[in-house]
Amino acid sequence: MRGRPPIDSTTSLTRVGIGADNLAVSSSAAMRAVAASLRFNLAQIADLPKEDTSPAAEHQRARARSWYAALHQEFGATRPFGDVIIALFAASEGYLDKLLAASPPLPDAEAAGRVAGAVAAVRAACAAEVAELEASLDISSKCRTAFKAALGEHVAANKA
């Protein structure tokens, strides 16, 4: 399982958010908001011909790497709900595309480290908003705005 997301994200999101507390939050409003296009994006990239090197195809590949990096966790490891949502939010908004931009693509461990760094930066800069997210299981416009600002600063300081 090393180097792969904890699930087959093209077909299922049912395990996301199930942790040690056995609280299944895969259908929370926040999860639906940040992962709405996940299945479509990953299914679309799976159908993309390998020989297609157009800018649009490369953009899709970068986004897929971002989704996989956001979903990555070691076998048996758990992550707090807020961390999962922040990572998926960063992927869905394109921030991870910029953090993970490299040719050839970054190794899984390095990509996971960059995602963890982005999540830590958001947690540090937006503690109140993360607490609100974790309490409500929803991502408000206030949270989105704060997360975008924190991620923008983090990306500007840490581009690949």
Image: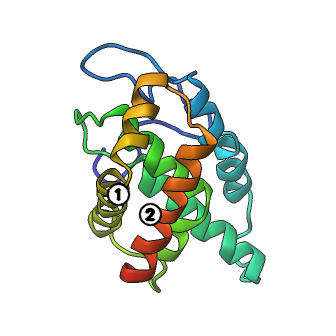
Please tell me which residue lies in front, 54 or 70.
Answer: 70
Q: Give the amino acid type for the residue marked by disc 2 in the picture.
A: Ala
Pinpoint residue 155: horizontal percent, then vertical percent.
44, 75
Total number of numbered labels?
2
Q: Which circle marks residue 8 in the picture?
A: none
Q: Name the residue under label 2.
A: 150
Q: Marks 2 and 1: CB-CB under 8 Å?
A: yes
Disc 2 from disc 1: Cα separation: 6 Å
Q: In this view, does 50 lie above or below 25?
A: below
Q: In this view, does 138 lie to the left or right of 40?
A: left
Q: Is mark 2 on a helix, strand or loop?
A: helix
Which circle marks residue 125 in the picture? 1
Viewport quadrant of the C terminus: bottom left
Residue 85 relative to residue 27: left or right: left
Residue 106 is situated, as x and y percent measured from the top left of the image, at 38, 75
Residues 55 and 132: in front is: 132
Q: Position of residue 45 (x, y in %)?
A: 68, 59
